[in-house]
Amino acid sequence: MKQWYEQLFDNYSKKYDNESFTQGTTGECDFIEEEISHNKSIQILDVGCGTGRHSIELSKRGYLVKGIDLSQSQIDRAIEKSKGKLIFTTLNGLFPLFHSVKEFINSGAEKGQTSGNTFDLLTFRDYSVYETKDDSGNRLSLKCNERCYVPSEISWLVKSLGFTKVQIYGAKLGQFSRSDALTTEDYEMLVIAERQQ
């Protein structure tokens, strides 16, 4: 049987944000900043973060904050409220489509790192074996399974998570830039998604 606080917070996230005791966030965060001497290198763990009122405010102020809470609905609301960006790279499905699949498979073998590549056009998955050594010199042989995405698909997936502005660029190794348009020559794509306010 659930504890009372588990029952309460199962479906109490939007109402919680309107409670009188949640309205002092700015002043409370001012106090926290003073207590840690405005040291932005300090990492903050917000235990019982609720809907993220302190975590979000402190993040806006430049702190690295991680919030945890027992209530999934409270965490979901915190994610919904956050003015965050999602930045990641993923394999560009246009690359193997534009280049012959055979050429794509052989490009990994030329690097001497992968073998046994099989690219499945129905699932856009590349199956390969990655050969390497670990830090102790032990040989590793790893069966890999990587998924490629086309821009329209990744845009749809990210929007389904609640991000409304999705931009996709070419991902140049060590040189990410918004000025690099995605092309069929880019092995990876850079995705930047934002929640509109």
Image (cartoon, rainbow, N blue to C red):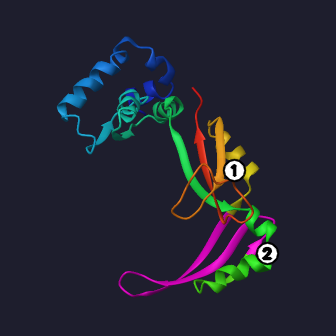
Residue 167 within the segment the image draws in magenta: no
Regarding mark 2 in the picture, which secondary structure is present there?
A: helix
| Secondary structure, magenta segment, majority class | strand
Number of numbered labels in the structure image: 2
Q: Is residue 138 magenta?
A: yes
Disc on res. 101: 2
Determine the residue positioned at 62% across, 37% down.
Answer: 163
For image coordinates 67% across by 40% down, the residue present is 159
Task: Looking at the picture, tell me which residue is in the foreground, 70 or 120.
Answer: 120
Q: Quarter of the image holding residue 3? A: top left
Residue 52 falls left or right of residue 184: left
Q: Is residue 54 above or below residue 133?
A: above
Amino acid type for the residue under numbered disc 1 = Ile
Question: Can you give x and y, in whole percent of width and height, for residue 177 in the image?
Answer: 57, 52
Magenta stretch: give its range.
119-147
Label 2 near label 1: C-beta < 8 Å?
A: no
Q: Is residue 72 above or below residue 13?
A: below
Give the residue pinned by disc 1.
154
